[in-house]
Image (cartoon, rainbow, N blue to C red):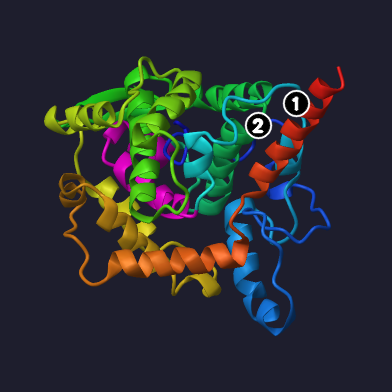
Amino acid sequence: MTSVVAISAVGSTSELPGEASGGAREHATPTGPSGGEQPVGRVGRTLAPIRASLMRTFTGQPTGTPQWVVDLEQGDDRGFFGPGSAAWAVHGDMPTIVAGIRALLTQALHPGALAGVHDHSRYREDPFGRLSGTIRWIFTVTYGSRATAVGGTRWVQKIHERVVGTYPGPDGSPVPYSASDPDLLRWVHLAFTDAFIGAHLVWGKRPIPGGPDAYVAEWALAGELMGVEDPPRTYADLQMQLRSYLDAGVLRNDERVDDVVRFLRKPPLEPSLRLSYPVLFRGALTSLHPDYRRLLGFSRPRGPVVWGTKVLLAATGAILGREPAAERAAKVRLARLDAAEVGR
């Protein structure tokens, strides 16, 4: 999936090389996935349960920095992306929370991608184990060294080898699918890229160096790592390739899609997150292209959804911090490499 990310569909990515995401060692520094310092005093005590719930959802642990994030400080190269890249701007900003929901909704419209989730995923039993695994893959490729990014991707590809089966075609006859199928890999990459750039264009705070075209071009590299052939490199090409699936009649809504949408609409969240999640879900729906939204069976949500989502993302950023801990770890690696270069 682009795994790919997986967010999608084809098997969990929560066990990349090294420790499983849920079992990462904790560190004393009270930072969350976004790297901000933990609030102190009465306000801090009030926000602590929400912060812990968010961190448990995103990283698999309520406190501390996961070991895999700390390990991004290691490596002997600068990585595929860096400060000033479009990938850092988009993936380091808060709209990624909405983008994850939007990507899942879009990916579910492809019966092959959905079959992978339905047949091989434990998303009902452990939906946030999958989420933390997805975050890990994204941040590893975005912020890690090239060797770390390639290694993490190869691990995901090994998982994909087991994800095969069939799904019912339009006439009821079985259609074979494989998570490693080039067309399915392409669809997941397209849906992911569109979701993240789409959410950022609505709610992003960080300017994107080079704009949407730069992000699509940069993240094409992640698609190529996963085996996507000739991924789009401009925003217009991204939209054209996405549209081709709709025009060809590949995408559809059926009982399985409705089941996944019901789950995404009301997932088993911790109590402190249940009131805010509907705002994010409505934000994801609002940001979707009307054709995909209609195919999912929704109309555009009413009310000040964009504004409400903006407020919620700002509050979440205030709780977690604006800079991802993974980004800070990458900067430590880059500073070490720069110092070594100067010392030569």
Q: Position of residue 155 (x, y in %)?
A: 61, 25
Q: Position of residue 152 (x, y in %)?
A: 62, 28
User: Could you say which disc has been placed on residue 32 in the image?
Assistant: none
| SS under mark 1 | loop
Callout 2: few (<14), some (14-19), or many (20+) C-alpha neighbours within 10 Å? many
Relative horizontal placement of residue 100, taking residue 106 as reference (left or right): right
Count of all numbered marks drawn on residues in the image: 2
Q: Which mark sits nearer the N-terminus, 1 or 2? A: 1
| SS under mark 2 | loop
What stretch of residues is rendered in magenta?
Answer: 94-119
Q: Is residue 227 visible?
A: yes
Q: Nearer the viewer, residue 207 or 130?
A: 207
Residue that badge 1 annotates: 75
Residue type, numbered disc 2: Gly
Q: Which residue is located at x 50 percent, y 42 percent?
A: 89
Q: CA distance from mark 1 to mark 2?
A: 8 Å
Q: Nearer the viewer, residue 71 or 343?
A: 343
Relative horizontal placement of residue 278, taking residue 6 as reference (left or right): left
Vertical placement of 139 versus 296: above or below?
above
Residue type, numbered disc 1: Gly
Vertical placement of 3 versus 80: above or below?
below
> Overall secondary structure of the magenta stretch?
helix
Residue that badge 2 annotates: 144
| Pointer 1 with pointer 2, Cβ within 8 A | yes
Q: Is residue 169 visible?
A: no
User: Looking at the rendering, which quadrant does residue 150 occupy?
Assistant: top right
Residue 333 sits inside the magenta stretch: no
User: Looking at the rendering, which quadrant does residue 75 occupy?
Assistant: top right
Q: Position of residue 110 (x, y in %)?
A: 27, 35
Q: Which residue is located at x 24 percent, y 49 percent?
A: 255
Q: Which residue is located at x 63 percent, y 76 percent?
A: 47
